[in-house]
Image (tube, rainbow, N blue to C red):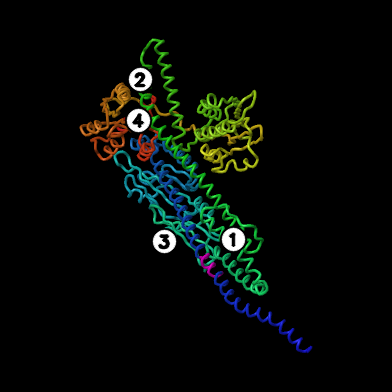
Amino acid sequence: MSTGHEASSLIQLRTPSSLSWKLLAAILPPVLLAVSGIVWFQYVMARREILRAINKEAASTAKRLASNVDELFEQRRRDMLTLSETPLIADYYRNVDFGLLDEAGAYRKELDRYLRNFSARTGVYARIAYLDAHGAVVAEANAPPTQARERSRDASFLKARESGRGGLWTSSIEDRPGVGPVVYYAKPIFDDLGGFKGVLSATYDLSRLRENLRSVVVGRRGRAYIQAEGDRRVEGRPPSEHGLEQLTAKSPLTGRPWSVVVESPLDDFLGPLRTVRNTALLTTLFGMGGLVVILLLLVRSITRPIAALVTAAGKVGEGDFTQRLPDGGTDEIGRLSGAFNEMGERLEGNRRQNAELQSQLIQAEKLSAVGTLISAVAHELNNPLGAISGYVQLAQLEDCPPSLRRDLDHVYANVLRCRKVVDNLLFFVRQSRRERGKVDLNRAVDSALELLEYRLLKTDDVSVTKEVSPTPPLIVGDFQQVVQVLVNLINNACDAMAGVVRYPEGKRLLIRTGAAGGRAFIRVEDNGPGVAPETAQRLFQPFFTTKEPGRGTGLGLSICRQIAREHGGDVVLENRPGQGCALTLDLPAGNEADFERLEAVGEPVRHPAVPGKRVLVADDEADIAEVIARLLREDGDEVVVAPGGAEALKLLEAGTFDLVISDMEMEKVKGPDIFKRLAAGGGRSGAKVLFVTGDILNPAVLEFLSGTKSEFLAKPFDIDEFRQTARRLLAQGV
């Protein structure tokens, strides 16, 4: 009996073990195969998606670099055009032609100085030289000390001469001793009669381009380079190890048989993925051992959160991004729940951001509509202002009683006031070129306060205190951009004080200027509520705004900081929560050497009258046309007035003119139509063209004037400025 009982016990103990192994034998192989297959499939899909993303990013990087390189070469072409158009070259060879060698020597020195200044300002040319028609070096910049001014019959001289008038010869990438990779440019110089007068030669040093290529980071060992003809290259970094499979993307350059190439070893991107794959496989194998014991227990614990995940995912698919899963711990399911929750938060954040972007887009469309309205209003104001200004200035030139002269002075002063209002509208709508000049920060403060005078005094009732430096702080920069920064800072201060009631001092704005230690500053301080500490950290981030929807885009302060940094400075916040805050525009102060270079251009040349010329005036504003005609007739010119564009075209077909002065916007036939007809040979003379327009805000007008490089004056114009411009154009035809 005892022996049978022990045998029965052994059977009971062995049966669960046998069933477990059978269960494991039935479950483990398909699970192992399934898990391995899933891991491998995910690896293959991930590899494909990663390669697709990397290829796309590499192609985008190559395209972006190609665009930047195209812009660099285009700038060099514009530099050659700028250098070739300097009057110093023409003055030199004309004096040589007339045998005035002393005068020619003086112009050669001026040209030498001009080329050196241009080379120093751009900082990208290893050499710039002007060679006469025989190949002799006349003037040059950055020549080696041992190099003399000797005759040069190199390929660039001959190629440039063969390119003909208006041509520009460009070499491939060459190696210049002591410099490195360079590109040679050569442009022929011809006089007005088509005589060959020499070649303007420039050697573009590609060192900066190599630095830009060196800064491109693609993976850990990637690089970017420019592939020219044959095996000529400009490389930022040396190639990686040989024998590695490379990911390569190319983007051709415009106008050149060159390409920008971005390459990187595939192992830089796929190595971590392979590590993840191997780790996943090893984890799967080790997990099989634990699965033997806890498989049945885990089924329920796994299916329950998966069911919850499916339900939540379905609701997210229906648009409910607030769905969240409970914390599932640190295992795979827990991490999956955490990833799902993170995904939901991102989707919800993206939805909020899309709503904000949509609101900003609507605001941008409103601003665009306002800009169009301002353009129309400015055009309609400028035409009558131009007529009034012209007649008043003509009357001021006549002998008249003192009382009448005072009245005329008052009228002209108010015309200038109206013009200033229109100019202020133009200032904030037109695209400002980044010019560099001497900027008086005290005057910039005055300009910004004039722009905001109505809001400060009449709308927001803000008391403004100015504490400007007795010695005006001077910088080298763009006056318009400095004023733009100040206007943004003052507007933000007004917005911050909008909901604040302080008795008895009210809303107070303090603006200070000063300079110390080689720095100049403008400080804008308000007595508003200040900025919350958590907000201060994000204040300069793009699209971040504390204003309610519809009132701000969140770009003001970020643009201010960007402009300040472009000037070598910064915008600094000094926060006093509950008492206000101060924003300081800190900039590097200018020095006398900088100002002397800026003022080296000197006073503009005064042009005498050129009588006996025939001028066509086309303007549908009869008063403005009459003012222009009177000014030209006083110079002794024959003037024919056309009351519209169609009449102007008929007059051009019937006769010849030395100068055509035309409005841009007229009925039926407009200024650009007259320009196109002249360019196509519609007139029988090579007439110069001067546009006068009050529609300077119109993007189409700006694009036309910029694209054709046409001379123009904005209405209302100063009659002396008009006279000088007309005389200069007429003198060019002499």
Q: Mark 4 highlights which residue?
A: 692
Q: Where is residue 155 in the image (x, y as percent from the top left)?
A: 38, 53
Amino acid bearing label 2: Tyr
Q: Of the residues under marks 4 and 2, which one precedes in the sequence?
A: 2
Residue 724 rendering spot, x and y as whole percentages = 37, 27
Spatial CA distance of label 1 from label 3 is 62 Å
Question: In which quadrant of the rendered image does the C terminus lie?
Answer: top left
- Residue linked to disc 1: 308
Q: Is disc 2 in contact with disc 3, using a CB cutoff of under 8 Å?
A: no
Quickly name the residue at label 2.
391
Secondary structure under the numbered disc 3 in the rendered image: loop
Residue at 44% x, 55% y: name it. Answer: 174
Q: Tag 3 or tag 2, which sits nearer the N-term?
A: 3
Foreground residue, 46 or 712? 46
Q: Quadrant of the N terminus?
A: bottom right
SS state under label 1:
helix
**Which span of residues is magenta-colored?**
39-47
Q: Can residue 6 be seen in this view?
A: yes
